[in-house]
Amino acid sequence: MEEQKEMKLKVDKTIWKDMFRYLKDFKKDFLILGSFMIGLAAMDIGFPLLTRYAIDNFVAKGDYEGLTRVGILYALLALSLGGIVFLFIRRAGKIEMNIVYKIRKDAFEKLQRLSFSYYDKNAVGWMIARTTSDATKISETVAWGVVDLVWGGTMMLGISIVMLLINWQLALITLLTVPVLALVSVFFEKKMLVSYRNVRKINSKITGLFNDGIVGAKTTKTLVREELNIEEFQEVTTDMKKTSVRAATLSAGYLPMTLFISAVGTVLTLFMGSNLLMDGFLTYGTLVLFITYARQFFDPILELARIYTEMIGAQAAAERVMGLLHEKEEIVDDLVVQKEDYGKIHGDVTFEKVSFYYKEGEYILKDFNLTVKAGETIALVGETGSGKSTLVNLACRFYEPSEGRILIDGEDYQHRPQSWLHSNIGYVLQAPHLFSGTIRENIRYGKLEATEEEIIEAAKVVHAHDFIMKLEKGYDTEVGEGGGMLSTGEKQLVSFARAIIGKPRLFFLDEATSSIDTESEAKIQKAIEEVLTNRTSFIVAHRLSTIKNADRILVIDQGEILEEGTHEELLKNRGHYYELYTNQFVEEAGKEVLQGKVG
C-alpha cells in the first residue's frame, strides 16, 4: 500500500510547492487575501506609533484637545480594522471551502479514471480518508496559514524596520530571540512530523474498520465476530489515542517554549529600555512603543510557530493527497484515438499470444490463444485461481496484456478508446452492486436517456418486472445504500436489467448466478438464453448446470485450456469437465435430499 512508502522526516518544501502549484487557480483569491492582511498588519503597527505620539506630545502636556483628536483617529482606525477583519475572514473561509471542493472533486475524478490495479493495491478506508479528513486538514492549513503567514511576516518586518529606525540598540535586544526560536523549532520539527504522520495512518485504518464493520455487518454476525471486531477496533483506537496524545504533547511543549522565550525578550526590552529612559536617551512614549512592539513582535512569532506545527500535521495529508492526484493511470487512450468515431462493435474477439502477470515473472496467463466469433457464447470453468476472471478482465480491458494483444473485430483494442469498448459491454458480477437511488435510476444508470418503455422492457427480459411491480412504489422503490433494501436475488435481477438496457454487443457474466437462490437462478437462466442470442458472450460459471447451452466450454487450469467443446462433447470425453460436473451434480442432489428431510 502507498501508505507504507518511506517518507522524509522533515518539512518537505517540494510537497508544499507542489500543493500551491496545484492551487494556482486560487492565486487571485490569495493575492486579495494577502492585501487584506498587509493592510491589517500596517494598522496593527500604526496603533503603537499613535500611542507614542499621544504620550510624548499630549499626555505629558495635558493637552486634552490633542488627545481627543488622537482618540477620534483611533476610533476610525478601529472601524477600518473591523471592516478588514470581516473581509479577510470571509475571503479565507471562501478559499477554504473552495480548496476542499477542488481536492474532493479532483480526487473523485481521479479515482473514477484509475485502473483496477489501483483498487487491488489500496484499501477502501485509505481512499476515503484522502477525500475527507485529509482534504479538510489541507484546506484549513492552507487557507488560514496564508492569512497568518502574510500577517505575521508583514508584522515582523514592519516592526523590525520601525524599531531599528527609532533605536537600533534596543531593537537588537528584541530581535536576538529570533535565532533562539529557530533552534527550538528545528528540535521539535522531526518529532512532530513523525507523530502526525502516524496519526494520519491510524486514522485511515479506523476509517477502513468502520467501512468493513458496516458493509460486512451480516457476515460479522453469522461468524459470531462481534466481540473480536470490537477488540480489534478498540486496539486500533487505543493506538490512535496514544499517538494523538503524543503528537499533542509535542505541540503543547513547543508553544509554551516559544511563549517563555517571547516573555524573556519582553523583559529584556523593558529592562534595557528603562535604563535608556533614565539616562535620557529614550522618551516615555518610545519605551511604551518598544514594550508594545516587543509583545506584538512575539505574537506573529507564536502564530508562525503554530502555523509551523499545523504544516507538519498537514504535510502527511498533503503527501497522500498529492500522491493520489499524481497517480498514473495504467490504461490511457491515445489523444488521436479519442477523437475518432469507430462505430458499433460487431463482436469478434481474439486473444493472440496473450501473457499476463501482476508481478513480473509470475504469469497468470502465458501465450494464451483464443478466437471467438461474433455471437458465440463461451463458458469458462475451472478451479479458483485458474485464470477465468483474468480472461474476462482482459477482454473487458480492465487490465491490458503484459505481452501479446487482444483484437476486437480484427483490431488491437489498445488502438481504440476505452469508451468504445466499454459502451458495447454488458457486465454482471457475482456480488451485485446497486447505487443509492430508485430501481428505475439503477436500471438506466448506464443509459440516462433511456425511456420508460426501455426500462420496463429490460426488466421484463430478465424477469425482474413482476417482483418490481409487487413493491409498493414499483420502479420508484429506493434500493438503499448498496441495494441493501433488496434481496441478493432481486439485486442481481436489477443489475442484469441494467447491463442489457444499452443493448451491448459483448456480454460478460462473472459467476453471476453463484450467490442467488434456485428460483432467481431459474429466472436469470431464462433471461440469459434470451439475452445472449446473437451476442458475443463470456460466462464464468460456478454452477455448471447454467452453461449447458454454451457454444463452447473451456476448462481452464493455470491459465491454459485443458479441454474445449460443447457440454455433450465434454461429458462424452469423461475428462476434467466430466469430473467437475458429476461431482457438482452429486453435491447439489445431496443438498436437495437434506433440504427435503428438513422440510
Image (cartoon, helix red, strand yellow):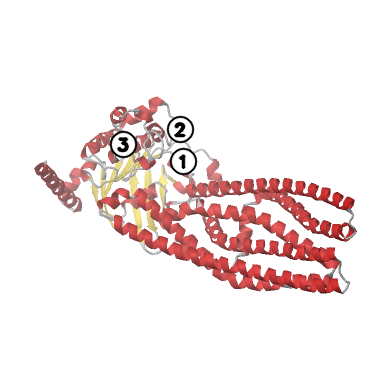
Which circle, 3 or 1, is nearer the viewer? 3
- For the residues bearing labels 3 and 2, Cβ distance under 8 angstroms: no
Q: Cα distance, mark 2 to mark 1?
A: 17 Å
* Of callouts 3 and 2, the N-terminal one: 2
- For the residues bearing labels 3 and 1, Cβ distance under 8 angstroms: no
Residue 401 appears in the figure? no
Left-right relation of 162 to 329? right
* SS at circle 3: helix
Residue type at tag 1: Trp
Residue designated by label 2: 448
Q: From the viewer's perspective, is residue 286 above or below residue 450?
A: below
* Of callouts 3 and 1, the N-terminal one: 1
Residue type at tag 3: Leu
**In this orientation, which residue lies closer to the viewer: 209 or 79?**
79
Q: From the viewer's perspective, is residue 11 above or below residue 28?
A: below
Residue 196 appears in the figure? yes
Q: Which mark is residue 493?
A: 3
Q: How many other residues sit within 10 Å of disc 2, few (<14), some (14-19) or many (≥20)?
A: few
Residue designated by label 1: 420
